[in-house]
Image: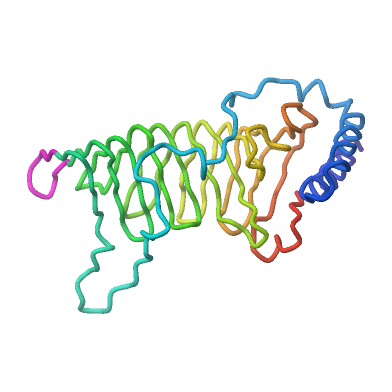
Amino acid sequence: MLARRTREVSALFLRVAFSSKRVFGFILFALAIAVISVGSSARAQQTNPVDRKVTNPMTDMPNVNPLTQDQPVRPRTPARPGEPAQATDQLKVDAGTQTVSGPEQARVFVYQGNVDARIGTYRLQADKVTVYETTNKVIAEGNVVFDQGDQQRITGTRAEWNYRTKTGFFIDSTGFTNQTQDGTRIYFTADRVEKVSLDTIVATNVQVTACDEDVPKWSFFAKRAKIKTGDRVRVYSPRLRIKDVPIFYLPYASVSIKQRDRASGFLTPT
C-alpha cells in the first residue's frame, strides 16, 4: 500500500515540479511528500556513492576546442555504389603534436594537445588521444568531451571508443540528452557511462535530473540508469531528492524524453 501511494505521489510531484508558474505550490507539495514518506525515510538516508554534483554540461565544460555555431558538424551521407568513401567516413584528427609507431596497417597514433577527432556527426575532444588502427579503438585521456551531433554530449576524465561501432565507455562523466520540444534536457552525472548502441547509454552510480541549477530542484540517485536518446530515461531503484534532501525510494522510474510527449511541459514517471 505504501509503495503504491509513493508511486502516485511521485508522479504528481514531478507534474507540479516542472511547471515554472507553480514555484510556491512546488514547495508546499515537497513538504507534503516529506510527511507521507516518513515510513521510508530511514532507507532514503543512505549515502549515495556519487558525491559529485550535477552541473550543466553545456555551460560548465573543459576549455577544449568548444563547438561553435559557425562550425557545425555536418551529418555524413551514404556513398553511392562504386563511389569512394566520403572524407567524413574517415576519422580525422587535429592536434598539437602527433607520433606514429608500429608496422603498416597496425599503426598506433598518439595525439597530444587540444586533440579534436571527428567522424561523421561524432566529435571527440581531449588532451591526449591514442588511435589503434587495427581495432578502430580510440583511447582519450584528460578533459574528454564527446558529442553526437546535437543529440548528446558526454564528458569524462577518460574514455575508450570504437569509431566504427560507435560504442565505448566514459569514466567520471557528466552529460546531457537531446533537447525536447519544450526546451528540456536530461542531465546526468555518473561514475561510468557506457555507450552500448547508437542511441542508448547505460550509466552506473548516476544522478539524473532535468534541472540545470548547481543544486537541482529534484534529482534521482540510482545504481543504474538507461537513457535512450529521443525516447525514455529508465532509472532502477532510484532515490528521489528535493534539493539535497532525500525524500523516498522507488523500485523503478521511467521518464519520457520524446518530442511529442514533452509538448505539455511535464515529466511524468511511470
How many numbered marks are there?
0
Residue sitting at 36 percent across and 59 percent down?
Answer: 71
Q: Is residue 224 left or right of residue 113?
A: right
The answer to which of 51 and 41 lies nearer the viewer is 51
Quarter of the image with the N terminus is top right
**Percent from the top left, x then y, of residue 227?**
58, 48
Up the image or down, 80 lies above or below 13; here it is below
Up the image or down, 79 lies above or below 113; here it is below
Q: Name the outermost residue toward the left.
A: 103
Chief secondary structure of the magenta span? loop
**Percent from the top left, x then y, of residue 170?**
43, 38
Magenta span: 99-108
Q: Is residue 150 located in the magenta-colored stretch of the structure?
A: no
**Percent from the top left, x then y, of residue 90?**
24, 59
The answer to which of 75 and 169 lies nearer the viewer is 75
Residue sitting at 54 percent across and 34 percent down?
Answer: 190
| Any part of residue 26 in sight | yes
Scheme by which the image is coloured: rainbow
Residue sitting at 10 percent across and 40 percent down?
Answer: 102
The answer to which of 36 and 73 lies nearer the viewer is 73
Residue sitting at 67 percent across and 20 percent down?
Answer: 47
| Any part of residue 270 in sight | no
Q: Name the outermost residue toward the front.
A: 70
**Percent from the top left, x then y, of residue 258?**
64, 61
